[in-house]
Amino acid sequence: MSSVEGWAIRKLRELADVRVSNVDKKSFANEEPVRLCNYMDVYSNEYVTGAIPFMDATASLAEIDRFGLIRGDVIITKDSESPDDIGVPAVVSEEIGGLVCGYHLALIRPSQEHLDSIYLAKQLSTSSVARYFATKASGSTRFGLPVSAIEEVEIPTPPKPEQSKIAEVLSTVDRAIEQTEALIAKQQRIKTGLMQDLLTRGIDEHGNVRSEETHEFKDSPLGQIPVEWEFTTLGSVVLGGGGVLQTGPFGSQLHAYEYVNEGVPIVMPQDIRSGEIEDEHIARIPEDKARSLSRHRVKASDIIFSRRGDLERCAAIREREVGWVCGTGCLLVRAPRNQLDNRWLAAIYQHDLSQRQIVARAVGTTMVNLNTSLLASLQIVKPDVVEQRRIAEILDAHDTRIHAEEACLNKLKSQKTALMQDLLTGRKRVTPLLESEQVARSVS
């Protein structure tokens, strides 16, 4: 029995009906048209709603009767390529006409009297249940859960009102997370459109995006550009102005055994994400080793490019990163400050104008590579450096908004993790909330 007062530990078979679906994706003329809820519809969503673009398929009347989904059903992924990633739950949170549970999934229909469906889905998503499912999954290249294993999973079961209040608290956090994710996606779409305008049309001295109606444009090998802009190559600007374009240190100059816990960070391709350098897992070397690699230490006007794998990765060096070391898998560009703003260069490099060239010219088969010759020959458009800085500041301000929302999202996810650990184990009870609601109802 549970050590939490008023909670019992019960087998899922006592609380719900478990059905393993055999409805495949094939369509037959003698069957009924349905919408099919497939593996990824469950794996990628905590809540199954009508907004998901379900697959059109067919099913027999018997299959529709047995595997047709209704609000309150919980679905889990019955099969997986890994036993550690199986039994992932989602709850059907609204009525969706003609929706049927597909193959590789198990439909769990809770007893409405004894079990709240959202509460059940949350319990099935806990690490303890994941460990249980991992031990029960069988197979070699593909793993599956037998019905008996699903039915035998133990569910901590407080009274139904307490379950529903726990579900309400957690689903409220889920909605906040979903709304924040949608806001971030919207801001990123706005940024994409903004970049298209700013990096091909720019902004005039009055802060307005140029247009054909109000400004003059000219043809270039990269399309029409403002007449004020120059068409050139990166090498012409950098090397022609006395700048630097070089690879990181050779592998013989820097070895993994030289890494230390405290020291000067070394920027590797995996540290460059979303146009910035993340230092959470960054490698470090002693200061004396960094001094021996002085030509690879970065300055405020620099930009670092990944030279293998994901060639879209690049980052303009910020003040906090001055003195760090450009790693073996990267390229370092130091452009004359009166010619190129490094933030502008990072933006234009990640734009289609540049990435189409990179993809077409990158060398290598199993892993594509960037080299100094390719980077030097990159064709770019170049406004004067004052306009570059104006554009970079606009994009920076937009990034700041996105980062603020991402910080909010991370905070919400941390709060959700803590709440699940507390509420689903009974470490913290929602009974005071229920009691206060009961008092409020009695007063009213």
Image (cartoon, rainbow, N blue to C red):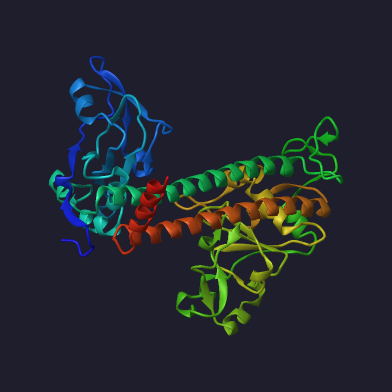
Q: Residue 387: x percent and y percent? A: 81, 50
The single residue placed furthest to the top in the displayed view is 30
Quarter of image, res 299 = bottom right
Res 433 visible: yes
Res 139 visible: no
Vertical relation: 389 (above or below) 13: below
Q: Residue 89: x percent and y percent? A: 30, 46
Vertical relation: 416 (above or below) 114: below
Quarter of image, res 306 = bottom right
- Residue beneath the point at 73% across and 50% down: 394
Left or right of residue 416, residue 311 in this image: right
Left or right of residue 147, residue 205 in this image: right
Vertical relation: 321 (above or below) 365: below
Q: Residue 271: x percent and y percent? A: 53, 63
Q: Closer to the camera, 87 or 122?
A: 122
Q: Closer to the camera, 311 or 165?
A: 165
Q: Closer to the camera, 210 or 91?
A: 91
The single residue placed furthest to the left in the displayed view is 148
For the image, the number of numbered tags is 0
Left or right of residue 82, residue 261 in this image: right
- Residue beneath the point at 72% across and 55% down: 235
State the quadrant of the N terminus.
Answer: bottom left
State the quadrant of the C terminus.
Answer: top left
Q: Closer to the camera, 369 or 202?
A: 202
Q: Residue 177: x percent and y percent? A: 48, 49
The single residue placed furthest to the bottom in the displayed view is 288
